[in-house]
Image: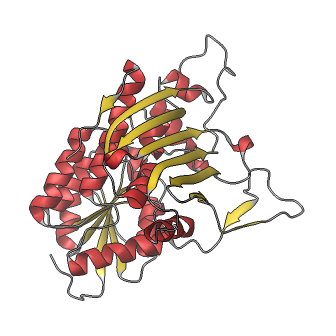
Amino acid sequence: MTSPDSNIFRCAVLSVVKHAYVSNGVAAHPRFELVVVADDADQPDWVHERNQKYADEKGIPYVRNVEKAIRDYNVQVAVVSSEAERHADLSVRAAQAGLHVVQDKPMSTRVSECDRIMQAVDHNGVKFLLWNRNGLPAVQQARELLDSGSIGTSKAIHVDFYFSKDVGPLKGSRKTDDPPLNWLDFQIAAHVDGSDGGVGKEPMGELQIEGIYPLAYMHLLTGLNVKRVFARTTAHFHQLYVDNNIDDLATVTLEMEGGLLGTLAIGRIGAASHPDIGEIKIHVLGTQGALVVSEARPEVAIHYRGQLEKEFRHRRIAVDNDFYLMNNFADAIDNDQPTVLDATASRNIAAIVAAALESSLTGQPVDVARI
């Protein structure tokens, strides 16, 4: 499907129940225009309310019929930001309708569903981009340094990805006879302060919710597949994670092609732990040197009288990740090239996460079922 104006891609937002950063990021590029919000009529009231609110904010219609919206508004791109367990269904339907797909993370809660997306994208000849942070200035500089050979051949890569948002009561702070916190109910209530990263009925730990970001860094910086993983996970900080038997802290060791060793430490560690969004660093050891990159740089620290307690003191500047991703997406469509995180790479990242979760349960290394 082609746009009547080859310079502009008309976009349908297929559900926007999470944070609107993906659809807003799409619209930040001048070649992409949001023209309609759509979802299925049988969705619950809270879903329709959020979709309608976003449509009203953007001054575009909300249609409670995905196929009708695609047909009536002549769209070329679908932007999917539903509950995680609905990602695959909406992305597959969009691809089957001939739309290019920009999708929120995770790709899906199941590798089999990721396979469906990949097959639909390949069969219909459309482009797919999973939202990521690979366009951040520090990450791009790391890529340039590695590509230049400044530290020789990479031998090991490690990523710290500690996310400092709070998620409800701290572990152990509730009474022993209190009922377990319901995952979906909490996510719906937490939307007001942006703590609802894992929206959906299925509880998801930090490896599933945020693991795509550091694993996408490794994919970008090494270009290598992961063969086997070993992981340890726990619910260390937050009662919500304890009650739902999922991880808020994890370590993963990755055996990669060519003998490269990867390691990852990830966790949602609470707002009191850090003045910014968290401690996020990339470490690369090479044959001729080493590289340590803080993902937040460049940043400035802002302090003023009467500053709100929860306001971040450290703020990133020169952040053009949204433009980078969508410029890459436009180039992929125009020139029939892969995106920076296409369906195959996204599916393989989901398989790494699934293998890591299996390893954390068995206590044994697990082979990654990659394509």
Residue at 28 percent across and 47 percent down: it is 348
Judged from this view, the residue extending furthest toward the left is 123
Q: Nearer the viewer, residue 121 or 367?
A: 367
Is 297 positioned to the left or the right of 336 in the image?
right
Q: Position of residue 104 (x, y in %)?
A: 38, 55
Work out whether 192 lies above or below 265.
Answer: below
Work out whether 206 lies above or below 161.
Answer: above
Q: Position of residue 294 (x, y in %)?
A: 62, 58
Q: Quadrant of residue 170?
A: top right
Q: Nearer the viewer, residue 223 or 28?
A: 223
Q: Nearer the viewer, residue 291 or 87?
A: 291
Is 370 positioned to the left or the right of 155 in the image?
left
Is 130 positioned to the left or the right of 137 in the image?
left
Confirm whether residue 198 shows in the render: no
Is 137 positioned to the left or the right of 54 in the image?
right
Confirm whether residue 247 shows in the render: yes
Residue at 23 percent across and 38 percent down: it is 369
Judged from this view, the residue extending furthest toward the top is 177
Residue at 69 percent across and 64 percent down: it is 315
Judged from this view, the residue extending furthest toward the right is 305
Work out whether 75 lies above or below 210.
Answer: below
- Quadrant of the frame with the N terminus: bottom left
Residue at 63 percent across and 11 percent down: it is 176
Q: Position of residue 225 (x, y in %)?
A: 30, 49
Q: Position of residue 331 (x, y in %)?
A: 30, 79
Q: Quadrant of residue 235?
A: top right
The colour scheme used to paint the residues is: secondary structure
- How many numbered callouts? 0
